[in-house]
């Protein structure tokens, strides 16, 4: 199977049907999305197509990018561009195999194909019979289409996997951030093209389809038995899109079964793979264009670290770190494609091309505890592409608003524990669901105010966080936190609840807003009087 010519990817068409088509059809106006059977495959498939376009069909400059956005190529144009690269994208055969080691690894004992799935229990877990929640045997045989995507997903997300089994170029369990147009019904082409960098932003030398520093499976693997590292200077500038930390060989067979992942009948399948340790050992200051990073402002010489998935998911408290660069204070380095979008918008508007400043920020990745996945996180957040000279002002305002939220959230959890327990400091356990209740309640208004602030910044040279916006946020956060307290403490129907303790905890929580330094400073910035009422504002004001 060749991944550039065979119909192996499921495309979601405008009429609601799903059809497996060759990748050359990604630019069809009838195709609106991908339709992979798993969330991690869906994110990986987007990265595969973006990486393919960035490698094979990359716009030379912003004018070429605008032309590609306005006039998608035909299937024939893409197919013609793919032809020189076809030898590098065979999944099987005697030559190079996509994302597989050049060595057949015949000396290595076959293992289950499910080892390609990051959330599958490992060999040690199965041996010790500790697969309590994620059972073994859920997926044993894959069609070659799903096997290809499982392999690619593992290589771009590879967590640590034991002695010599290397982590991915972005570290284990990295977050990926892609931009999507605000209009959900737009074509897949626009969802992909918006994430491409032009040649002026991505310093790329000539792209040779037979270059093993670009496609590492073309030549012998840079092994690392003695810890030999692979640095950015050792490989092609586009290598991060095709990095291959793990050494695998798929054992394809002509066996007719139904694929355990997509459910389709398949004649060519994979139930075992061969694997060997000591593959590419990526080290040094890598910067993958689709991933956010963080650097230490106090140690600017240290390489940036990719942002990883965390328990509690992704929400507005993470927005600034994923959307706005801040090297000086927080060290936030959003993904390069995210940082570049405001420039694209400005260039388009200068050329009279209408491309909206509002978009969506799709954030996804595994939440890993070393080699164990705790879960998959995936969110789509509103995104606003402001000109660079306005971004710092917005960043400061949002930081003040989120700072208030963090303080209130911490106090809410403390107050709920004080209402529930006689000795709250002695109580152990996961209380993050209290935080989650608060963040969910306050998220819609945050994004509404973000949009409002963006509009005002574009219209007027306002120097300070507008008082009316600050007042609305303060009252909303206060009201929602008190509502969350009541919901968690008073609405349980527990007849044995200690009402005296609950009343005391609630009064202290309300009094906290008067005394806390952050709340007082915010109230001052919002122009609210010192003795402003702590009572909830009427719901009709929302």
Image: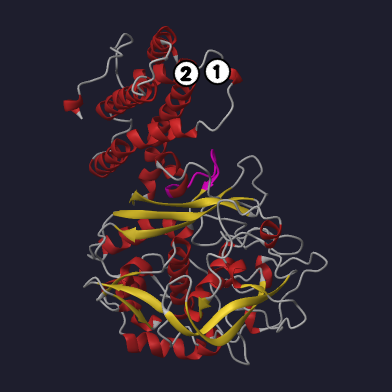
Q: Is residue 317 above or below residue 268?
A: above
- Looking at the image, which residue sits at the far bottom? 94
Main secondary structure found in the magenta portion? loop
119 horizontally vs 189: left or right: right
Dot 2: element: helix
Q: Which stretch did the figure color magenta?
A: 323-332
When asked about the image quadrant of residue 477, the answer is top left
Does the stretch in magenta take in 519?
A: no
Visible in this render: residue 150? Answer: yes
Residue 179 % position (x, y): 38, 59
Q: Residue at x 23, y 20 (%)?
A: 537
Visible in this render: residue 212? Answer: no
Q: Which mark is residue 508?
A: none
Judge by depth and name the residue closer to the eye, 409 or 464: 409
Q: Which residue is mark 1?
A: 424
Q: Residue at x 34, y 89 (%)?
A: 76
349 horizontally vs 404: left or right: left
Residue 381 % position (x, y): 36, 49
Residue 273 % position (x, y): 64, 76
Dot 1: element: helix
Q: Which residue is mark 2?
A: 420
Asked if disc 1 and disc 2 are in contact, CB closer than 8 Å, the reply is yes
Looking at the image, what colour scheme do you see? secondary structure
272 horizontally vs 468: left or right: right
Residue 126 % position (x, y): 66, 59
When asked about the image quadrant of residue 178, the answer is bottom left
- Looking at the image, which residue sits at the far right? 226
Alpha-carbon span between mark 1 and mark 2: 8 Å
């Amino acid at each position: 199977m060749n991944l550039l010519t065979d119909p192996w990817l499921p495309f979601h068409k405008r009429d609601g049907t799903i059809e497996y088509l060759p990748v050359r059809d990604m630019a069809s106006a009838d195709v609106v999305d991908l339709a992979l059977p798993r969330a991690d495959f869906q994110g990986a498939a987007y990265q595969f197509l973006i990486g393919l376009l960035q490698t094979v069909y990359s716009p030379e400059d912003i004018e070429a990018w605008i032309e590609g956005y306005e006039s998608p190529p035909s299937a024939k144009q893409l197919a013609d561009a793919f032809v020189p690269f076809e030898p590098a994208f065979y999944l099987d055969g005697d030559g190079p195999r996509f994302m597989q080691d050049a060595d057949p690894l015949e000396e290595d004992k076959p293992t289950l194909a499910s080892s390609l799935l990051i959330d599958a229990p490992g060999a040690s877990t199965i041996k010790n019979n500790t697969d309590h929640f994620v059972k073994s045997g859920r997926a044993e045989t894959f069609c070659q289409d799903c096997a290809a995507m499982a392999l690619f997903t593992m290589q771009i997300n590879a967590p640590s996997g034991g002695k010599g089994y290397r982590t991915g170029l972005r570290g284990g369990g990295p977050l990926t951030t892609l931009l999507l147009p605000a209009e959900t019904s737009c074509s897949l082409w626009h969802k992909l093209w918006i994430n491409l960098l032009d040649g002026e932003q991505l310093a790329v030398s000539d792209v040779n389809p037979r270059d093993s520093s670009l496609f590492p499976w073309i030549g012998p693997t840079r092994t690392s038995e003695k810890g030999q590292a692979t640095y950015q200077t050792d490989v092609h500038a586009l290598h991060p899109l095709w990095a291959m930390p793990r050494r695998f060989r798929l054992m394809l067979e002509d066996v007719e079964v139904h694929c355990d992942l997509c459910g389709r009948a398949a004649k060519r399948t994979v139930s075992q793979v061969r694997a060997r340790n000591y593959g590419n050992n990526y080290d040094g200051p890598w910067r993958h264009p689709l991933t956010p990073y963080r650097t230490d402002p106090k140690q600017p010489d240290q390489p940036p670290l990719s942002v990883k998935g965390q328990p509690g998911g992704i929400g507005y408290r993470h927005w600034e770190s994923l959307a706005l660069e801040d090297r000086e204070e927080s060290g936030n380095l959003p993904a390069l494609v995210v940082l570049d979008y405001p420039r694209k918008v400005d260039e388009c508007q200068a050329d009279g091309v209408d491309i909206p400043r509002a978009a969506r920020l799709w954030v996804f990745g595994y939440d890993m505890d070393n080699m164990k996945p705790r879960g998959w996180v995936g969110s789509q957040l509103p995104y606003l592409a402001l000109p660079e000279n306005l971004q710092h002002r917005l960043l400061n305002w949002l930081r003040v608003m989120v700072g208030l939220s963090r303080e209130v959230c911490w106090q809410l959890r403390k107050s709920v524990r004080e209402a529930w327990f006689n000795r709250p400091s002695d109580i152990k356990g996961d209380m993050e669901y209290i935080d989650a209740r608060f963040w969910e309640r306050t998220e819609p208004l945050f994004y509404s105010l973000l949009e409002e602030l963006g509009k005002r910044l574009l219209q007027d040279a306002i120097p300070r966080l507008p008082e009316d916006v600050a007042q609305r946020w303060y009252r909303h956060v206060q009201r929602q936190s008190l509502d969350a307290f009541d919901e968690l403490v008073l609405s349980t129907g527990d007849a044995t609840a200690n009402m005296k303790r609950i009343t005391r905890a609630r009064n202290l929580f309300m009094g906290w807003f008067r005394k806390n330094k952050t709340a007082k400073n915010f109230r001052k910035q919002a122009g609210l009087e010192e003795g402003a009422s702590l009572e909830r504002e009427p719901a009709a004001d929302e």
